[in-house]
Image: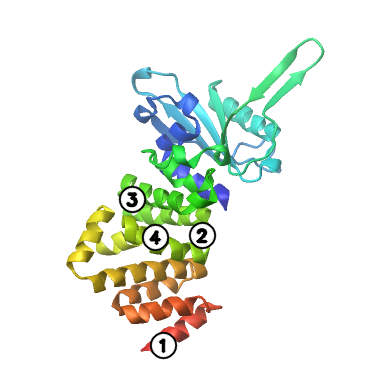
């Protein structure tokens, strides 16, 4: 699951990913480079052997030969204890041979903290004949406060994966959401990565209620914001949305808040259930009183059938 999440992230935002995960090697001119994904499955020496698959190998080329091409081997590691530097060295050697280059930079994204081998040396008493190390990005060792206003979308999306105090949890979540809206204008990607934020933030139902109460009213942040923008067919700042709500009346503003909260709770409880999208489209037609009743009822639902039964009783 985590591997796929980060593969998508890196392939959707390759320049920003290298600028964040491999800052020391990417350089300030990375945005000028052309980045080409390389095949993930490595060639086998024998057809019956098990293949090795990389997370996201990227070939980086600069225009006019400004810098010689570099191959970045980016790996995500969820459980640090499972990380194998020998396996990573194999990947890099295979790619170097396949691409006929010695310009290979291994990058490992560690989702969780832990002890791991940082370098590999092979040799004898007199000399080391092979030395290998890698760039490491330890997300849990990064201070989220240092990145909560970053203009790099990779940094903002990964705020929930960084280090922060329990008291800052909702503020960090809010900053990740607003970062997505500010830095990504494509509604489809907004919808895709709002789920990324939610998955790694993993807010409890009580935290969702607290977030809606404190942040929607104070800062205009709306959970499920990408979904709302997509339905409205526009991408505007959250302050304009609030102002419009005020102009159209307090009742409508309250309805929007209720819809946002109910949407978030339904997604949290039922995930990607095939019937959820149809239910969500019905919310805009519900009066505030029914939305508030649904909010209370959701907490008692055990399965999706409970939700459909409740809706049927309302009609």
Please state which of residues 202 and 103 is positioned toward the viewer in this rendering: 202
Taking the image as shown, residue 252 lies to the left or right of residue 258, namely: left
* Coloring scheme used: rainbow
In the picture as drawn, the residue positioned furthest to the left comes out as 247
Q: Quadrant of residue 137?
A: top right
Task: Determine which residue is flagged by label 2.
Answer: 203
Element carrying mark 2: loop
Q: Which numbered disc, 4 or 2, marks the residue closer to the eye?
A: 4
Please state which of residues 264 and 245 is positioned toward the viewer in this rendering: 245
In the picture as drawn, the residue positioned furthest to the right comes out as 125
Among the two numbered marks 4 and 2 on one chain, the one whose residue lies closer to the N terminus: 2
Element carrying mark 1: helix
Among the two numbered marks 1 and 4 on one chain, the one whose residue lies closer to the N terminus: 4
Q: Quadrant of residue 12?
A: top left
Among the two numbered marks 3 and 1 on one chain, the one whose residue lies closer to the N terminus: 3
Q: Which numbered disc, 1 or 4, marks the residue closer to the eye?
A: 4
- Residue 253 image offset from top left, x and y in percent: 27, 68
Task: Determine which residue is flagged by label 1.
Answer: 312
- Residue 20 image offset from top left, x and y in percent: 46, 34
- Residue 289 image offset from top left, x and y in percent: 34, 81
Residue 57 can be seen, yes or no: yes
Residue 271 can be seen, yes or no: no
Q: Which mark is residue 173?
A: none
Among the two numbered marks 2 and 3 on one chain, the one whose residue lies closer to the N terminus: 3
Q: Which mark is residue 214?
A: 4
Q: Quadrant of residue 163?
A: top right
- Residue 174 image offset from top left, x and y in percent: 41, 52
Is 223 located above or below residue 293 in the figure?
Answer: above
The reply to whether dot 3 and dot 1 touch (C-beta < 8 Å) is: no
Element carrying mark 3: helix
Please state which of residues 300 and 215 is positioned toward the viewer in this rendering: 215
């Amino acid at each position: 699951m985590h591997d796929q999440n980060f593969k998508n992230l890196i392939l959707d935002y390759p320049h920003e990913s290298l600028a964040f995960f491999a800052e020391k090697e990417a350089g300030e001119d990375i945005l000028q480079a052309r980045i080409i994904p390389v095949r993930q499955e490595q060639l086998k020496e024998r057809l019956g052997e098990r293949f090795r698959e990389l997370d996201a190998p990227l070939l980086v080329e600069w225009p006019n030969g400004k810098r010689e091409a570099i191959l970045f081997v980016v790996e995500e590691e969820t459980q640090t204890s499972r990380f194998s530097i020998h396996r990573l060295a194999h990947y890099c050697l295979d790619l170097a041979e396949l691409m006929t280059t010695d310009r290979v930079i291994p990058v490992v994204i560690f989702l969780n903290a832990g002890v791991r081998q940082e370098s590999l040396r092979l040799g004898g008493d007199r000399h080391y004949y092979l030395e290998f190390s890698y760039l490491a990005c330890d997300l849990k060792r990064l201070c989220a406060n240092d990145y909560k206003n970053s203009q790099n979308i990779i940094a903002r999306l990964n705020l929930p994966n960084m280090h922060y105090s329990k008291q800052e949890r909702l503020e960090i979540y809010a900053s990740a959401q607003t970062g997505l809206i500010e830095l990504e204008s494509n509604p489809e990607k907004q919808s895709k990565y709002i789920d990324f934020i939610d998955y790694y933030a993993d807010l409890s139902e009580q935290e969702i209620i607290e977030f809606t109460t404190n942040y929607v009213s104070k800062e205009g942040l709306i959970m499920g914001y990408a979904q709302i923008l997509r339905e409205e067919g526009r991408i505007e700042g959250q302050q304009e949305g609030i102002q419009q709500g005020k102009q159209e009346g307090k009742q409508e503003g309250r309805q929007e808040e209720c819809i946002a909260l109910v949407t978030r709770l339904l997604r949290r409880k039922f995930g990607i259930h095939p019937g959820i999208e149809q239910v969500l489209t019905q919310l805009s037609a519900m009066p505030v009183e029914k939305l508030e009743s649904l909010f209370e009822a959701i907490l008692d639902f055990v399965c999706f059938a409970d939700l459909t039964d409740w809706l049927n009783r309302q009609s």
